[in-house]
Every structure is written in C-alpha cells, then in structure tokens.
Image (spheres, rainbow, N blue to C red):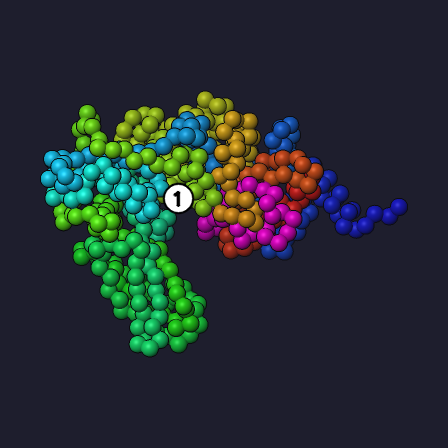
Amino acid sequence: MRLPAILLLLIASTAQAADGELPFGVRNALQIRNVPAESLSVFVTDVDSGETLLEWRGNEPRNPASTIKLLTTLVALDVLGPAYRWRTDVFIAGELKNGRLDGDLILKGYGDPYLVTERVWQLLRDIRHAGVTEITGDLLLDDSWFDVGEYDPAAFDRQPLRAYNVAPNALLMNFKVVRYWFEPDQASGAVAVRMDPMLDNVRVENQLGLANSSCHGYQRGITVTTNKAVDEVTFSGRFPNGCKQYAMDRTALSHNQFVYGLFESLWRESGGSFDGDWRNIVVAEDAEPLLSFDSLPLAEMIARINKHSNNVMARQLLYTLGAEVNGAPGTEDGGKAVISKWLEDNGLASTEIALANGAGLSRDTRTTARDMAKMLRFAWRKPYMPEYLASLSLSGLDGTLRHRFTNNELAGKAHLKTGSMDHVTAIAGYLQSRTGRRFAVVAIQNFENIHRGPGEEVQEALLRWLYEQ
C-alpha cells in the first residue's frame, strides 16, 4: 500500500529528530529565512519518563531573554512557598484622636511587586478604617528593605522612560509608571492629554498639534521629553486625527516622589485631608505598626510575572529572595547568590548559567536548553507544580501568547514562557501532544534580527512537530 506523501514526510521528520537532527519543518523554516541551524538550541524531554525526544545543540550557552524568569519564579516558589505574601507597614508618629493625626504618617515597604493604583487605594482605605482621616504632618517613607545602589535606567537600551527599565524599590507603587491618554479635538485642532494615575507633582506641557492622517506611526508622532529639575514632561509633534484614542505608558519622577504624588492624589480623592510634604526615614526595628497591608500571594504574583513577562516584578522577586534568605537589605547580588545555592542544592548547578538580573533584560544572561529543560522537569515533580504551570501563558489564549496559535490545533495545548529582545527569541515550558504525552520543551535562538519574525516561525514548526508525538 502506498502511503500519502504527508504521512511519509511526518515519519521522516520523526526519525530524523530521533537521530539528533532537527525535524523537517524546523529545518525548512530555517532554510526559507536563510537562518543557520547553528543559531538554534533545542531540548525536548518527556516529563514523566525522562526520555530525551530531541536535542540540538542543547549544551550551547545562549541568551534566553525573558525565559530566565522561569528560574527566578521557580526558586521563589520553592524557597518562599506559594502562599508567601509581602507586606507594607503603616506607622503613625504623633497623636491620633477623632480621626485627626497630629503628626506624620509613615509607610515602610517590603518589596510588594504589585502595589498598583487599585491596591494602593485599598491600602488607603484600610488606613481610614484604622481611624485616620486627617494628617497634619508629612508622609515619611522607608524603602530601606532593598539596597539598589546606583542604577541607570538608560543603561540597557537608552530608553530610560520605558516601564521595563524601572529599578526595583522596596516601596514600589504602580511600577512608577503613568499612562498618558491622548484624544484629538477636531473642532479646536488640539490634542487633549490626561494621565492615570493623576499626579499633582507632575507637570504636563502639551505642545501637540493635529495631523490629517490615519492612526499609525511610531508613538503616533508624539515626542516625549522630560525636565527632571521641574518634574515636567513635554509632549510635542503632530498627532494623527485618525486616532480616536491612544495610550502611552512612561515612567515618572523618582520612586519616593511617585509614592508621595500617588498617595496625595488618592488620599484627597477618598475624602482625606493632607497638605504635607515627604521625606525618607528608617523606621526603628521595634516600632509597632498601625496596620500591615498584605500583598497578593506569591502564586498569583508569578502568574503576573510569567504570563506578561513583567521585568520589574521579576527583579523585585530577586531582591526579595536576597532579603528573606540572607537578611535585609535585599540586593541583586544577594538574590543571585540564593538562586546559585538553590541550583547547587538541587543538583541543577551549571557553569553555563549566568543570571544577570533575574528578569532576562540583559545582554549577559546565559543558559543552555538542556539546563532549562532539566529545571522544567524538576518543577514538574514538585508539589507546587500546578501553581508553576498555571503561571505560564496558554498558547493562543492569554499572556504573551494570546495572539499566537489562535487558529490552529496548538491553541490551549502548551503552557509556555516566551522571551524576545533584539536578536534573541526563545520559548520554554510544557506541551501536551495529541497522544496525551507531556513534554518539557526549550528552544533558544540567537541570531541577527531573529526577533523580527523568523524565530516565531521556527518555534511554531517545532511545536507542531512535537504535538504529533
């Protein structure tokens, strides 16, 4: 009996993969894009049996971009536990009577990575429920739980206002990011600008005009400049009148200025009274807080880190590991030391792993496909595997994969972490095949402009082949 050509092709590609060769579809994707196969590392293993299904340059150290977050979040789950919570302590310095605090309010942060505007609103509500409605003094801030040292937000890519370049901080609020909304007014020829959250200590200079064009172009024609001396951001250029609305996220102020501005705005919005300034302090170790505000549990935090590849949250996690294991203040080096020891203690240490900042936002991060696959299989056998698995993007459904594999049989079949930056693309995670087998799969590719599309084509060819196993 003569077999169909497509079946012969599938059999051939499977046999080639078993012999250590790349599957036909993967090789074809590389050839079409004129990308050398040597730029790719792949490792696929059956998570139950440990059988290696495919290895291609698995021991070659490469930059994995954001897939390294899988290591940072796994160590956090194992060391801190899925129910771990950060806290933000509130103290009073003065007399509290009939809702009036005749003195200062103090906030001490312990590294909560997700103290976004909505959570800050809940914190302020708890303060009001504790009896404070009027503050006659200042807002005192203690962010000493972390020691970040000198930090240059422009060092990675000369984009200091981008949200992914924000430095860690023990009292981080809303990622230190403002979302600016732009809306054209056709009648006046002007562009309205509003910000969320509203910060009274940020001045906006709106020099935008309207252009008669469709809604396209880099930043929709908007140029952003800042004047840190007066805490001012200026928007200039010509905004397309074809845009109904456009949003841009950018960092603002220093960490403590941002906390003050957000606190002041939300406190007054909630009906509280406050006209003070702010300053830094270090709270005495034996001080009793008025209240402690707990974060979301770690299991929920790692989902926000991995599904949406949040760099500042991953870095907060690294500093937290350092502070909790080695004592405050948490540092980048301290967090990396915790992870290095964890790898050694669990038989996963490798001379090829270079962690950098724990988020993957670095040209110096390195690992191998084999080491990452070993880590994934280790995680599969741990009691917190369901929490870890659920933190990854579902193919075609959510996170960084919500727009990939949406209209094919791979949708919903893989839990993956993606990684992408200039000349780097990677995926790592788990896939269930058509036959029900479960695999850990890692593909890391470093090559000129591979992030511009060819890398994703190679990944899809690999996953399609794996789904048929």
Numbered range of the magenta stretch: 400-423
User: Residue, x 18% and y 55% (percent of image)?
Assistant: 229
Residue 367: say if magenta. no
Secondary structure of the residue carrying tag 1 is: helix
Residue lying furthest right in this view? 1
Q: Position of residue 410 (x, y in %)?
A: 62, 47
Q: Position of residue 239 (x, y in %)?
A: 36, 70
Camera-side residue of 231 and 277: 277
Horizontally, residue 129 falls left or right of residue 441, namely left
Camera-side residue of 333 and 216: 216
Residue density around tag 1, few if under 14, some if 14–19, many if 20 or more, within 10 Å: many
User: Residue, x 29% and y 45% (percent of image)?
Assistant: 121
User: Residue, x 16% and y 47% (percent of image)?
Assistant: 274
Residue at which label 1 appears: 311
Residue 402: say if magenta. yes
Residue lying furthest top in this view? 345
Q: Is residue 176 visible?
A: yes
